[in-house]
Image (cartoon, rainbow, N blue to C red):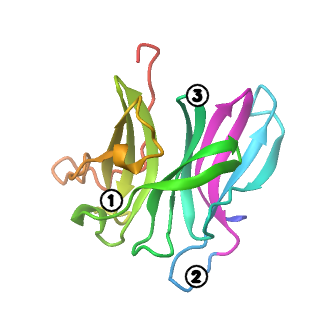
């Protein structure tokens, strides 16, 4: 996993630090013409993640061994959840958004559910992509922003949401915006918005 390390995120879970990231063993493309990234986890039990010792917890396994990246995690309804993008063998396109409960910070529990796949025109420009999910809770809704299309001026951001009390494992409970929420603005010279994150103040 020493090649093309992408999209690291650091999270504090049960008193320990974890870094989620994607990497590959080679820069060669697979038979579908895709990079061969998989998802991995590092753990640090020390208080200071900058000086502490990090250990590899290995690859996070999913039901199919395909291109996977952009993992994040969040705590909701008394459970720790894992959210990521992955290529499905039976679905056209490069990546979809999946959700699963975590048994521990490096092991998913049960069958993942697919929350979104590229279906609108703005999600399928250059490449058919849903990736880079990020979570924020505001009011009575849990929102997931995500990135779509190729990573050029076509890159843009979509939005999923669910009522905070609904079961996130039921795809029928999720809503998806038919339009992107951020796109390239040639007027403002802002190009290809994507793979964002949210920061909330103590006031919310």
Any part of residue 112 in sight = yes
Q: Are marks 1 and 2 in contact (CB under 8 Å)?
A: no
Mark 3 or mark 1: name the one nearer the start of the chain.
Answer: 3
Residue that protrudes farthest toward the bottom in the picture: 31
**Image quadrant in which the N terminus is located:** bottom right
Any part of residue 197 in sight = no
3D distance between C-alphas at marks 3 and 1: 34 Å
Whole-percent x and y of residue 85? 50, 58
Whole-percent x and y of residue 15? 74, 26
Whole-percent x and y of residue 16? 75, 31
Q: Are marks 2 and 3 in contact (CB under 8 Å)?
A: no
- Front in this rendered view, residue 173 or 196: 173
Mark 2 or mark 3: name the one nearer the start of the chain.
Answer: 2
Q: Which mark is residue 30?
A: 2
Whole-percent x and y of residue 143? 37, 37
Residue that protrudes farthest toward the left in the picture: 187
Q: Which residues are magenta?
A: 5-26
Per the image, label 3 sits on a secondary structure element best described as: loop
Mark 1 or mark 2: name the one nearer the start of the chain.
Answer: 2
The residue depicted at 27 percent of the width and 50 percent of the height is 190
Judge from the rendering whether residue 144 lies leftward or rightward of residue 124; answer left or right. Answer: right
Q: Would you name the residue on which mark 1 appears?
A: 155
- Is label 3 or label 1 in front? 3
In the rendered image, residue 191 lying in the magenta stretch gets the answer: no
Judge from the rendering whether residue 115 lies leftward or rightward of residue 15; answer left or right. Answer: left
The residue depicted at 46 percent of the width and 52 percent of the height is 132
Q: Would you name the residue on which mark 3 appears?
A: 78
Q: Which class describes the residues within 10 Å of circle 2: few (<14), some (14-19), or many (20+)?
A: few
Per the image, label 1 sits on a secondary structure element best described as: loop
3D distance between C-alphas at marks 1 and 2: 23 Å
Q: Quadrant of residue 31?
A: bottom right
The residue depicted at 58 percent of the width and 71 percent of the height is 66
């Amino acid at each position: 996993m020493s090649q093309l390390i992408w999209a690291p995120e650091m999270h504090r879970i049960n008193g320990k630090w974890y870094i989620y990231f994607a990497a590959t063993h080679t820069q060669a493309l697979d038979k579908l013409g895709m990079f061969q990234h998989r998802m991995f986890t590092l753990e640090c039990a020390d208080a200071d993640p900058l000086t502490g010792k990090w250990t590899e917890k290995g690859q996070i396994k999913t039901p199919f061994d395909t291109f996977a990246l952009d993992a994040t995690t969040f705590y909701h309804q008394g459970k720790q959840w894992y959210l990521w993008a992955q290529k499905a063998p039976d679905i056209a396109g490069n990546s979809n958004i999946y959700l699963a409960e975590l048994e521990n910070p490096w092991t998913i529990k049960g069958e993942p559910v697919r929350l979104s796949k590229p279906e609108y025109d703005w999600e399928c420009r250059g490449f058919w992509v849903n990736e880079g999910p990020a979570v924020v809770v505001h009011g009575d809704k849990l929102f997931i922003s995500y990135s779509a299309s190729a990573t050029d001026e076509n890159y843009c951001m979509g939005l999923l949401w669910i009522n905070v009390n609904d079961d996130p494992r039921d795809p029928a409970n999720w809503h998806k915006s038919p339009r992107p929420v951020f796109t390239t603005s040639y007027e403002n010279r802002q190009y290809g918005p994507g793979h964002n994150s949210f920061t909330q103040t103590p006031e919310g």
